[in-house]
Amino acid sequence: MKQRVLVALLTVLVFASGFFARVWTEGTPALPPPPAPIGSEFAPQASASVPHAAEPKKPVDRAQIISDIQKLGPQIALFQTKLEGLNAEFERNFVALLREDQCQRFMEAQKKLHSEKTAAPKSSTPLSDEEIEREKNTPLYYLYTKVTVTEKLRKLTEANSLDAAQQAQARDLLLKYREKFLDLVDSIPPLSYRLSYLATDVQKLAQPQK
């Protein structure tokens, strides 16, 4: 169990480190090249390509992603259905340990969150290559939020003013939820989980018009 959690966290951290490394390198201005030696203009030019020339970025293979989503569609749908059931189970168990005033506050917050999601207009504009890559990585960050019990408990405590006894009960619920969630993720092919977020916007994978 602990090994699986560690692997999940390391996966997220690897992707995160790559992302921030890219931001750092792109955000740092390049130094000008050193001056050429005197007389170098008469030297024969090397046929090799410029060492520091950036290679063109390979475009996202949208057709392959769509094909993978169609092929893995039943597994992705089953995963999403089971995840919804797992989330609903946790919510029922969490509400059961709340006082009446806490329960009302929690349900109002959930209702507000749901209304905000449903009210947000969905764009039909095709995703850019960068947006596709970001949505492919979203499940990895989502995985991080599901396995970090301490941070999730802190947020639940602050939002619902949990006392010490409730915090202990909530921690037990989060630990059980984490184990069930990881079992669910382990039950499907890795690519199914990776594409689970993009699968909800498959119609936006069309090539943007130039």
Image (cartoon, rainbow, N blue to C red):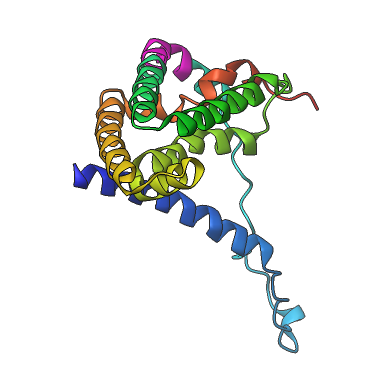
Residue 68 vs 133, above or below: the answer is: above
| Frontmost residue, 11 versus 165 | 165
- Residue 36 point in image, percent of width and height: 72, 83
Q: Residue 69 magenta-drawn? A: yes
Which residue is the extreme one toward the bottom? Answer: 38
98 vs 69, left or right, is left
- Residue 179 point in image, percent of width and height: 24, 34
64 vs 184, left or right, is right
Q: Which residues are magenta?
A: 68-78
Q: Is residue 10 visible?
A: yes
Q: Quadrant of the C terminus?
A: top right
Residue lying at 20% horizontally and 46% vertically, measured from the top left: 2
Q: Is residue 49 visible?
A: no
| Frontmost residue, 147 versus 125 | 147
Q: Residue 130 magenta-drawn? A: no
For residue 131, which quarter of the picture?
top right
Residue 37 vs 129, above or below: the answer is: below
Residue lying at 38% horizontally and 38% vertically, measured from the top left: 146
For residue 37, which quarter of the picture?
bottom right
- Residue 199 point in image, percent of width and height: 51, 20
